Amino acid sequence: MCICKYGFVGNGRTQCIDKNECQFGTTVVCGNHTSCHNTLGGFYCICLEGYRATNNNKAFIPNDGTFCTDIDECEVSGRCRHGGRCVNTRGSFECYCMDGYLPKGGPEPFHPSRDATSCTEIDCGTPPEVPDGYIIGNYTSRLGSQIHYACKEGFFGGPEDTVSSCTALGTWESPKLNCQEINCGHPPEVQHAVLVGNHSSRLGGMAHYVCQEGFESPGGKITSVCTEKGIWRTSTLSCTGDDLLEDDRIFNISVLNEACLKLNRHSKKVGSERMYQFKVLGQRWYLNNFYHATSFNFTTREQTAVVCLDLYPATEYTVNVTLLGSPEQHSVQITMTTAPAVKQTISNISIFNETCLRWRSMKTADIEEMYLFHIWGQRWYQKEFAQEMVFNITASSQAPETCLDLRPGTNYSVSIQALSSELPVVISLTTQITEPPLPEVDFFTVHGGPLPRLRLRKAKEKNGPISSYQVLVLPLALQSTFVCDSEEATSFFSNASGADGYVTAELLAKDVPDDAVEISIGDRLYYGKYYNAPLKIGNDYCIILRITSEWNKVRRSSCAVWAQVKDSSLTLQQMVGVGLGSLAVVMVLAFLSFSAV
């Protein structure tokens, strides 16, 4: 009986040819990370670069359990040059710069045999200057070094934000210290004294006072000094007078008419000057939110004086009068009511420039009239929003006008009442929406790798109701010419989508959760009516997030660049899809071949 020797195949009689053991596949014959080499009557295996055989031989036959294992190249010191840190990978290794170093001349991570990258020690250089400030002490420009700032003499700043640090980017943090020149403003008033001479409001400036006639300062000159905190340090001295001891501080008040009062004083010293403080408070029982409050000082040497008040019609007033400068500060309080006004003096109210009002006044020209405004603002789409304003203006024109400080996208009710009228006039107006807030996005730049999942955050409805969020894919070359309000971008299946860009996803505002939602570009799903198509491999793209507000037939949009993709590759979902598709094709071909046999 004739048979072929081991390593040969044939009938054993007429032919025996070499058996190619490697034809069954390198992984099947030699194992992972190997290359198979056929020989006459046999074969041998060699580990790929970055791997070694467990029997420590270059070539082996895996009949004794020998296999290829990863070589830890990082066991050899100095692999990554000065400042580099070695990280072992399967079959190779990568280099990164250590803390305190930055990559120069190439990418990171890098391989010393392929890339020219070198790691240089971080040096932030000369620190930035602070206007009117200086650096305290010495400093270094290495990573983590800190410098401390202080304001120059005559300037002051807050105690915080006086430190700048050298960052891992090789730059100094921008100092936030704001040095402002010390200015104490106008000197404080001193009772029974007047300010004399010129004074400086800068640091160290002094203000000098002289007591009024009939008063003196027994302790010496009265002065105030501007301090380094920007405020005046007032004097402990004051002006006093002997006539205070000779006044019994008794007075009474009588009403002459609906706006004037008569003041009668009982004093033992004729001609002594006294100061009275008037506090006036007016209210209307028929208008809950109406308050007219004013206060002023009145000085006189007369025994009897008449004081007329500037009062509004149809108002009940409480007037409190206090004698100042006395220990007890004697007070008198009276109540007075003004006559009612005419029924209505406002007509023909019109709105212009959206937030401005113009109306017709029945008052005679050149006679001043005061108008009280009470404004309420609400939003149907933002239940917690409420705005209320109360203010007044004075005008002598027969066609007064004013512009209101109103929020966009809001319904307002405006009440206007002339103080000579009994009742207010109420109108409604609506402000148009403006651009929504810019989208808050984490910007990505991707070079040849898969695009990470993009995180979409819900925006606040500050300027109007937000209707939708759109994700647009544009060729990178069109980023600089893209107009956010443009409606030209269509779906992926549009004929022009490849050249002009397209909308790849749209989410209605009501479908976006309060925290965030993640979107993967190219997952082949439909978002709204738009198909999220995969990016074409090798092309450069710009991903834009657009927020749109629509209300009262007005549309406003805000956009932000979300990512830039250069030399795009397949995403993880696309790679899985391609892998499964390739497997399916192989299985179909195998089935057809079996059927044919």
Image: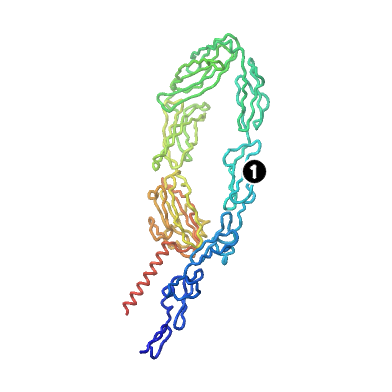
Q: Amino acid at mark 1?
A: Ile
The residue wearing badge 1 is 135
Density class for disc 1 (Cα within 10 Å; few <14, some 14-19, many ≥20) is some
Quadrant in which the C terminus appears: bottom left
Where 199 sits versus 39, above or below? above
> Of residues 263 and 545, which is closer to you in this image?
545
Which residue reaches farthest bottom?
14
Quadrant in which the N terminus appears: bottom left
Q: Is residue 567 left or right of residue 242?
A: left
Where 432 sits versus 104, above or below? above
Is residue 152 visible in the rendered image? The answer is yes
> Of residues 168 and 543, which is closer to you in this image?
168
Q: Secondary structure at mark 1?
A: strand
* Residue at screen point 44% across, 42% down: 409
Residue 380 at x, y percent in the picture: 39, 41
> Of residues 204 and 207, which is closer to you in this image?
204
> Of residues 439 and 304, which is closer to you in this image?
439
